[in-house]
């Protein structure tokens, strides 16, 4: 019995379909890569934020300055001195005035941390918490 | 003649379609992995944020109760943080350890749930009030004048201006609190150091402490402040003045809330040569004086002069003695405690508190040992001003804390020692201030735990 080969048309159509499929696959790689990287950034981001919150709390409620400061972190969430760090954590402390408009040691303080990634617009993570004298 | 095999026709397309299905499946799997990874990160992010919010709720409750002890949330209170963000915490308090409503000033649970994007976490801590212990030996809220040959053993601070005269010995940290603190340079003895804090220190006023005490002792919510102790519930006064006796148990009538020579003339001369202090028999320094006795309780006076052949025995071996001086904002001659005219049957500094709620200067003169804290900070008056002046002019020893709006230690060689060995302040293991002790704020005690953790 003699087997007959594929026709040229069959081959071209098949190659076209496979090409379209592979093209779609390749086109989705950046999306998948981007999502994976974003996931990783979020994961590191909230740990960086937690570090900043704990660091602020460890300064002590009375000593903690009324200020905004930034800290640089690498892609793994380690502090770095790099001028172009992977992550930048911006921490701010603000005291809510009392009913008379005064700020003092018995007021509530707001601690806000925002973590930004170098190549992404908008924060990868941000969190706000309250601090009080004698609090946790 | 050539024939096509129908079974073989279109095989390439079939193979291509099979290949596409396989590739699509792999693609879909990879995308699902990315999406699920993203979703996991997002959930973890919310999970972390929910914890921060839960802790925010705990701290918010501490702040709220410290501001007004009657405002504790025995029912859950919910707050968005930041407002309008959809992120929130729900917090309430329960009595510790039995649960139920927290209506006393004892230990309590704070239970707070933070919720972010449907993810909730709940934390629970044990909290309590904190008193003077562990705070300052000496604090001048508006003005601090340290002089003579005084020795201060403990932290010293001010929100205002420091003036140093003479050669005081400062064995503790000196803390400038807030931007308004300044004045002369001080040099604590190492390891004491000069410190700066960004916020001015805030103390409750005598009125606020009196309101808190009214709630604690009489279950009365009042805004009368120190003047509350001059009122009554029908015929029963909100003070313990009627329990004052001489050393023989004879009642002493405190006329018009004034403690002066007329008061002491009602008392028999104290003929006890010895007296028991913390279980130890010692010579009675008030021997031969007309002595009145203040046992555990809250006393209210509108003038207070103890000097010469008159004496007061603070019988605080069995409980806390609080002396409230009013009326709030009243002016007049100084209230004077002269050397050797007060004697304490306990050397536990947390057992005695002298609160000056009026504008009269509280003046300590001569040589004596005071085991307790002296507090003169009240207001605001009708002009919105705060007040309270303490002058320490003698050579005595104060085993406690001295806190006033204006504190002047200008002459003599008095020693202020604080905290005492019996303190139960922050970091201590005690149950917190005993009933009757002032509470300056409420905060974390022990036992951070997450409920229903994953």
Image: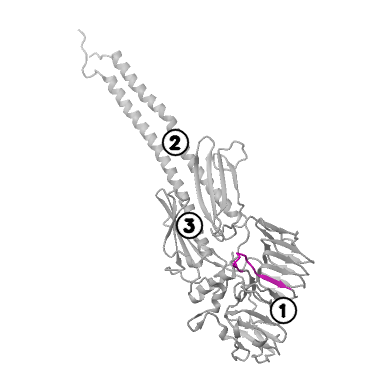
Placement of B428 over or under A81, stated as above or below: below
Q: CA distance from mark 3 to mark 1?
A: 47 Å
Report whether B176 appears left or right of B90.
Answer: right
Give the mark nearest the N terminus, 3 or 1.
Answer: 3
Q: Quadrant of residue B204?
A: bottom right
Q: Quadrant of residue A72?
A: top right
First to last magenta residue range: B378-392
Q: Secondary structure at mark 3?
A: helix
For discs 2 and 1, the disc positioned in front in the rendered view: 1
Q: CA distance from mark 2 to mark 1?
A: 75 Å
Marks 3 and 2 on same chain: no
Mark seen at residue B388 = none
Placement of B228 over or under B55, stated as above or below: below
Q: Chain of mark 1?
A: B
Q: CA distance from mark 3 to mark 2?
A: 33 Å
Q: Chain of mark 2?
A: A
Residue that badge 3 annotates: B57
Of B119 and B338, the residue lying toward us: B338
Residue that badge 2 annotates: A35
Q: Residue at x 21, y 17 (%)?
A: B6
Q: Position of residue A14 (x, y in %)?
A: 31, 20
Q: Secondary structure at mark 1?
A: loop
Placement of B183 over or under B7, stated as above or below: below
Residue that badge 1 annotates: B368
């Amino acid at each position: 019995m003699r087997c007959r080969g594929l026709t040229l048309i069959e081959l071209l159509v098949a190659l076209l379909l496979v090409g379209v499929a592979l093209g779609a696959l390749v086109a989705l790689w950046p999306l998948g890569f981007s999502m994976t990287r974003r996931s990783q950034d979020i994961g590191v981001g909230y740990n960086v934020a937690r570090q900043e919150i704990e660091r602020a709390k460890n300064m002590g409620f009375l000593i903690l300055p009324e200020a905004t400061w930034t800290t640089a972190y690498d892609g793994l969430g380690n502090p770095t001195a790099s001028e172009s760090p992977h992550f930048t954590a911006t921490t701010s402390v603000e005291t809510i005035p009392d009913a008379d408009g005064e700020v003092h040691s018995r007021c509530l303080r707001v601690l806000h941390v925002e973590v930004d990634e170098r190549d992404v617009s908008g924060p990868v993570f941000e969190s706000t918490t309250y601090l009080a004298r004698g609090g946790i | 003649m050539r024939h096509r095999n129908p079974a073989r026709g279109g095989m390439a397309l079939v193979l291509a379609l099979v290949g596409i299905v396989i590739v699509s499946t792999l693609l879909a799997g990879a995308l699902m992995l990315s999406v699920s990874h993203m979703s996991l990160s997002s959930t973890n992010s919310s999970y972390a944020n929910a914890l921060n919010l839960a802790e925010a709720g705990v701290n918010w409750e501490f702040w709220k109760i410290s501001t007004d002890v009657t405002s504790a949330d025995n029912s859950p209170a919910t707050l968005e943080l930041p407002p309008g963000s959809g992120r929130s915490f729900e917090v309430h308090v329960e009595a510790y350890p039995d649960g139920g409503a927290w209506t006393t000033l004892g230990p309590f649970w704070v239970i707070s749930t933070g919720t972010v994007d449907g993810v909730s976490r709940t934390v629970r801590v044990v909290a309590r009030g904190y008193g003077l212990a562990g705070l300052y030996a000496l604090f001048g809220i508006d003005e601090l004048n340290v002089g003579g040959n005084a020795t201060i053993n403990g932290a010293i601070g001010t929100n205002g201006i420091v003036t140093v005269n003479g050669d005081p010995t400062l064995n503790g940290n000196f803390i400038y609190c807030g931007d308004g603190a300044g004045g002369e340079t001080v040099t604590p003895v190492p390891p004491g150091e000069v410190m700066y804090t960004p916020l001015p220190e805030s103390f409750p006023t005598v009125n606020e402490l009196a309101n808190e005490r009214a709630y604690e002792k009489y279950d009365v919510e009042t805004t009368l402040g120190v003047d509350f102790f001059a009122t009554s519930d029908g015929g029963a006064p909100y003070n313990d003045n009627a329990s004052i006796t001489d050393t023989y148990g004879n009642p002493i009538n405190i006329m018009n809330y004034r403690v002066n020579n007329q008061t002491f003339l009602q008392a028999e001369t104290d003929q006890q040569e010895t007296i028991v202090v913390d279980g130890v028999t010692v010579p009675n320094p008030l021997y031969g004086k007309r002595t009145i006795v203040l046992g555990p309780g809250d006393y209210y006076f509108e003038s207070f002069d103890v000097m010469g052949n008159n004496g007061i025995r603070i019988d605080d071996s069995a409980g806390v003695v609080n002396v409230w001086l009013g009326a709030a904002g009243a002016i007049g001659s100084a209230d004077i405690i002269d050397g050797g005219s007060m004697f304490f049957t306990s050397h536990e500094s947390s057992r005695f508190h002298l609160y000056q709620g009026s504008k009269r200067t509280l003046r300590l003169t001569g040589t004596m040992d005071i085991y307790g804290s002296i507090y003169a900070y009240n207001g605001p008056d009708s002009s919105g001003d705060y007040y309270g002046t303490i002058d320490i002019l003698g050579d005595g020893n104060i085993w406690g804390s001295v806190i006033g709006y204006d504190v002047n230690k200008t002459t003599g060689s008095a020693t202020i020692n604080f905290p005492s060995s019996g303190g139960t302040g922050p970091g201590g293991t005690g149950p917190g201030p005993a009933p009757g002790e002032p509470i300056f704020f409420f905060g974390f005690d022990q036992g951070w735990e997450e409920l229903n953790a994953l």
